[in-house]
Amino acid sequence: MTVVEVQVLDGGAPIIQFSWGVPTKAMVAAVRDVKAKLGIQAVSADSAGAALDRGADFLVCQGTEAGGHVEASRGLCETLPIVLEEARDTPVIAAGGIGNGQGIYKVLTVGASGAALGTRFLAATESTAHPDYKRALVAAGGKDSALTICFQDGWSAIHRVLRNRTFIMWETARCKSLGNRPGEGDVVATQDDGTKIVRYENTSPRIGFGGTVTECPMYGGTSVEYIKDLPGQEN
């Protein structure tokens, strides 16, 4: 297990959730040793079955509407019934594109045991997202969220982000590959320790970043359309 995983377990976390693959048997044993609940992300019948075989206490069913790096290849409304059928009596949490009470109610009525919201909480007081990032989330609509491979430096997985200048430059240039992308190598932001962030890196802007931070990847699901305010802050 990684140092972070050990720290989480030592800290007494009651729930440990894995995504992007099934944890090893050693990881599961470590979770069981501290009597924590084990959750594993599932995006198909096969991945749900593998998670159940590894002893998952609950599954998290992700759809392509989710923000950030997306394991799913189908929308939530298509994937959720498949995962629910495979899960049978094991609780399933629905994730992807859910941003309000109506979305939560919808997945509960079709059999999910709960809903997971991510993008909504980026625009919250406790979030460490850069203030300009939070304001972009509030200003965005559902169509401003794109599923892409634009910001692939650091991790080449498919991801969902807000359309920004970097994305538009890349899309306008017909989605050029590594080495041929417009503005490649430009420094667009700096971290508070002086570390440079170049265009197409997968690092999202946090508090303390300087520069044109909105040209960094601003991860956000289709649920951005429901974000209309910044709780506890001046908009």
Image (cartoon, rainbow, N blue to C red):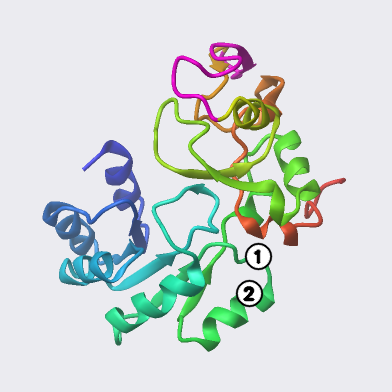
**Range of magenta residues:** 175-193
Q: Say whether residue 177 is magenta.
A: yes
176 with respect to 133 (left or right):
left
Q: Secondary structure at mark 1?
A: loop
Q: Residue at x 65, y 60 (%)?
A: 223
What is the chief secondary structure element of the magenta stretch?
loop
Distance from the alpha carbon under mark 1 to that under mark 2: 6 Å
Q: Quadrant of the N terminus?
A: top left
Q: Is residue 34 above or below residue 80?
A: above
Q: Are marks 1 and 2 in contact (CB under 8 Å)?
A: yes
Say what amino acid the circle numbered 2 marks.
Gly
In the picture, the disc for residue 145 is none
**Residue that sits furthest to the front in the current view:** 174
Asked where in the image residue 199 lies, by quadrant, the reply is: top right
Q: Secondary structure at mark 2?
A: helix
Residue corresponding to mark 2:
103
In the picture, the disc for residue 99 is 1
Q: Is residue 20 above or below residue 187?
A: below
Q: Say whether residue 194 is magenta.
A: no
Say what amino acid the circle numbered 1 marks.
Gly
The x and y percentages for residue 161 are: 59, 43
